[in-house]
Structures are given as structure tokens and as C-alpha cells.
Image (tube, helix red, strand yellow):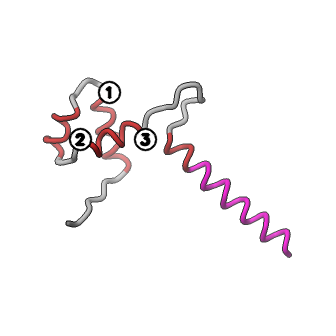
Amino acid sequence: MKQKRYNKEFKETIVELYRTGTPVNQLASEYGVTDVTIYKWIKLHSPIEGEESLTPADISAIQKENLRLKQEVEILKRL
């Protein structure tokens, strides 16, 4: 079975519709996305309490950027 790819805007639209009160099962049937996938998007695009409105996606992006910068520093140190 071929896996579908959804762009960021589509995911954010689904999450926003959920936040405005549309039930997940209705969104799933209307847009052809599974309930589990929608719940995953909601979790991914929801701010973490206690943090400065960072979502898990934001944290992941920051960690990737941090790793890339550390690798660049190591390369420069070797030179």
C-alpha cells in the first residue's frame, strides 16, 4: 500500500479544524485521513505546557539544527 504524503499546511488546517470543535472522526471521513494520523498531527502541532509555546515539531527542528551546527564546529576545529 502506498503511503500518502500531506503538506504542512494541510496538517495545520486539520488541526485548526479540530481545535474549532470538529470531531476527529468527522475530519477523518471527510478528508480521507485515519483517526490515528489526525491525533498524531494534533500532538505534533500542540504547544507543550510550561515551554514557550514550542511544539514537538519545533523542538525536533531545533535539535536537528543544533546537531548540524555541532558538526560544523567539529569540522572547523579539525582545520
Residue at image coords 67%, 53%:
66
Q: Which residue is mark 3?
A: 44
Residue 68 included in the magenta stretch of the image: yes
* The quarter of the displayed image where residue 20 is located: top left
Three-letter code for the amino acid on which mark 3 is drawn: Leu
Question: Magenta stretch: dominant SS?
Answer: helix
The single residue placed furthest to the left in the displayed view is 29
Crowd tier of the residue under label 2, counting other residues whose Cα lies within 10 Å: few below 14, some 14–19, many 20 or above: some
Total labels drawn: 3
Residue linked to disc 2: 35
Q: Which span is picked out in magenta?
A: 61-79
**Residue 76: assigned label:** none
Residue at 13%, 41% (x, y): give it. Answer: 29
Q: Residue at x 33, y 36 (%)?
A: 15
Q: Earlier in the sequence, mark 1 or mark 2?
A: 1
- Residue 57 picture location, percent across and down: 49, 45
Mark 1 residue type: Arg
Does the magenta segment cover residue 14? no
Asked if the residue under mark 3 is in contact with the one under mark 2, i.e. CB atoms within 8 Å, the reply is no
Among numbered discs 2 and 3, the one appearing first in the sequence:
2
Residue on which disc 1 sits: 19
